Amino acid sequence: MTRPLLPVDARDPGAVLDALRVALDGGPAVAPRTDDRVPVDLPGVVPQAVSLVVETSGSSGRPKRVALSSDAVLAGAAAADGALAGPGQWVLALPAHYVAGLNVLVRSLAAGTEPALLAPGHFDIGAFVAAAERLDHAVRYSSLVPAQLSTALDAAEADRAVADVLRRFDALLVGGQATPAALVERARRLGVTVVRTYGSSETSGGCVYDGVPVGRTRVEVVDGQVELSGPSLAEGYLDDPERTAAAFVTRDGLRWYRTGDAGTVSPDGVLTVSGRLDDVIVSGGEKVSLGVVERVVREQPGLADAVVVRAAHARWGEVPVVVTDAAPPVLTAADDLAADDPAADDLAALRSAVAAVAGRAAAPDRIVRVDTVPLLASGKPDRVALTRLVADLAAS
């Protein structure tokens, strides 16, 4: 059996909310879009089990359409409620085509509460605070990415009224990219409750909170790769059986999603994700995880949104390169800087900080400064474009 698939322009979060309400009640499935165009390859119908299709490019590679059932997204909502303070009212501060933004809408529908919807676009802390002040439920939540949280904390440190509003949230969920520990510590010093989430569209969003699986989610690390199981898993990828078979496997009677992330699980069951399995380079004969380097780089002042990519090097083979949007394009390389150049001090301090955590081979070779870091439709950095940019700058 099948049901219709309805494209919905996610620039209107209210329209997505209304369409989701119908979809979860058995009506047409929803495919949130970033515009009003309908791709020629988007099917008009989907299997009856599918109620939501989330299109994402991930951090690299060709686009994929993740097919989620009502049972999966509602299981994710129930697991979140159980791990937090129960059903509540939400502020939607993320785009309505992101799985984290969609989760805000689904959890609102499951709780029977009306979310406060922010207009898509640049995060405006004033609008966020105004939306939070409109909430009338005793339990309050929002979901942010680290850059939004940083903006909110900047405002809270300068304005006690903003800090009071942030403290009234039972939890601010933060995911989407590695969240610097220093950012979380800033929030805690202000009395703001932050929960770091881990998950993906394939798991109906965050299903691991502060390293601990929520609800009936299970986590295992198999051959160094993080695998997730539980009722919130996607049906697979729409019209892509090969990709589905590669990402979803059955083991010990359970269905597992192979995340592509490297990680470890402590004896007490806490997950630590170290980066993507495919982000390992060999520099001077030593393996270096770009994910680990990026996490350390983002802990440094002014680099919370930096991205680390690979680059060829005549001597070391490959090296990590930091890209940040602090200034017009400038290539700062360890081999090119004069000793009295102020940029040399910046790079030396960064190299020292990374080497102390990840070893000398992991020390970034360069800092590339750009006007704007290119993003995928998912809002994640376009690492393919950044890698190409770094290579082009080095060759020029």
Image (tube, rainbow, N blue to C red):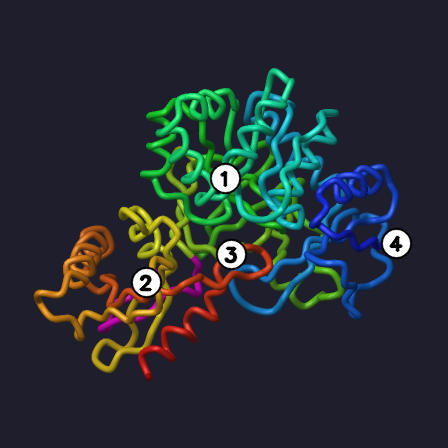
Task: Compare residues 273 and 94 and report the one nearer the observer.
Answer: 94
**Residue denoted by label 4:** 4
The mark nearer the N terminus, 3 or 4, is 4
Q: Position of residue 92 (x, y in %)?
A: 62, 37
Q: Name the side, left or right, on which 18 lies relative to 97.
A: right
Residue 380 numbered mark, or none: 3
**Residue denoted by label 1:** 197
Magenta stretch, residue numbers = 276-290
Q: Name the side, left or right, on which 362 lies relative to 339.
A: right
The mark nearer the N terminus, 3 or 1, is 1
Magenta span has 284? yes
Secondary element type, mark 1: strand
Q: Name the side, left or right, on which 15 lies relative to 352.
A: right
Q: Nearer the viewer, mark 3 or mark 1?
A: 3
- How far is the residue under mark 2 from the one under mark 3? 16 Å
Secondary element type, mark 2: strand
Classify 10 Å Cα crowding around label 3: few (below 14), some (14-19), many (20 and above): some
| Helix, strand or loop: magenta stretch | strand
Check the image and name the residue furthest to the top: 138
The picture quadrant where one finds residue 102 is top right
**Residue denoted by label 2:** 322
The mark nearer the N terminus, 2 or 3, is 2
Q: Position of residue 326 (x, y in %)?
A: 34, 57
The mark nearer the N terminus, 1 or 2, is 1
Q: State which quarter of the image contains the C terminus.
A: bottom left
- How far is the residue under mark 3 from the one under mark 4? 29 Å
Residue at 64 percent across and 42 percent down: it is 119
Residue at 30 percent across and 63 percent down: it is 288
Q: Callout 4, which amino acid?
A: Pro
